[in-house]
Image (tube, grey):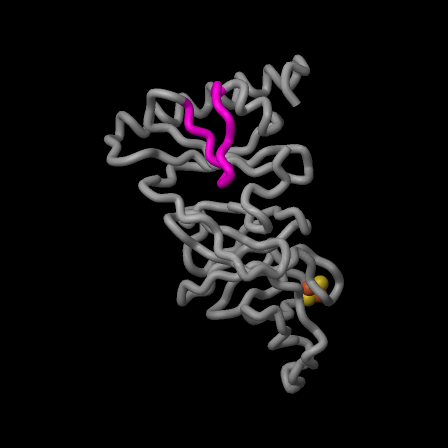
Amino acid sequence: MHSDTTGSWTPVALSADLPAGTVIPARISAGSIALWRSESGRLSASADRCPHRGMSLSHGFVRGEALSCIYHGWSYAQGGNCIRIPAHPGLTPPETIRARTFAVEEAGGVIWVAADETETKPPVLEGLTPLRSMTTDAGISAIETAAGTKASAEGLIEPAGGTLCLLVSARNDGQTLIHVLLKGETSPADRIAASREAESLRRAAEDLQKKGIAS
Ligand code: FES
């Protein structure tokens, strides 16, 4: 089973789901992360744990170029270093207070995060347009069986005879994250049809998983 689809890079979200000035939770093999985009559009990924008392940073808020914790308001820069402690406004936080950060890249409307330090870049998915993301309780093998084809090295499953393409990555909670992508130019009707096809593939894969036909 794939744990990461492409070495240490995991496709964690679609660009459209992370507007400027927002933060969302995501998962990589190293654990839960807070994925955020500053108000100027810079992307960051940090461990989803505030160094102060452990609150999830994905519950926090973005202000300007910093991510702030919802609990006591400590603020972190893109590099993970703490830049502000509201209870001590005159204090410059020591460099040792920092959230762990991960490399993040955005290409073709998909956001990728590397679980480990890497010299590589995530794959470029040519000619594909992101449509939506979904999770499933089925494993990648069950999705492959339902789709009648195997995933590529990049984690792409392309059912025959349509515009649909699924970018899959296994999560360490047993679920699989699926980004639904479309091939070439598509009409609104094509997009609706592809979304329905993806839903029905998900149901078929979950049935297979429950019956133990694929795992
Ligand atoms: S737990 Fe995050 S600021 Fe206190």
Q: Position of residue 20 (x, y in %)?
A: 42, 59
Query: Which quadrant of the structure image shows residue 198?
Result: top left
> As rendered, which of 61 and 124 lies closer to the eye?
124
Where residue 80 sits, quadrant-wise, is: bottom right
Image coordinates for residue 58, horizontal then vertical, percent? 60, 54
| Residue occupying the point 39% across, 48% down | 109
Q: Is residue 19 left or right of residue 46?
A: left
Q: Residue 202, how many percent across, how many down? A: 51, 23
Work out which residue is located at the far right of the displayed protein and give it.
53
Q: Nearer the viewer, residue 107 or 97?
A: 107
Identify which residue is drawn at 48% across, 52% down: 122
In the depicted structure, whether residue 194 falls above or below residue 37: above
Which quadrant does the N terminus fall into?
top right
Can residue 148 be found in the magenta stretch?
yes
Total count of labels: 0
Q: Does the stretch in magenta take in 188?
A: no
Report the quarter where the C terminus lies: top right
Name the foreground residue: 4 vs 174: 4
Q: Quadrant of ligand 1?
A: bottom right
26 relative to 94 in the view: left or right? left
Q: Residue at x 42, y 23 (%)?
A: 159
Give the magenta part as a residue range.
Answer: 147-159
- Is residue 87 placed above or below 121 in the rendered structure? below
Quarter occupied by residue 214:
top right
Majority SS type along the magenta span? loop
Name the one closer to the observer, 56 or 41: 41
Q: Position of residue 141 (x, y in %)?
A: 59, 25
Q: Residue furthest bottom?
A: 90
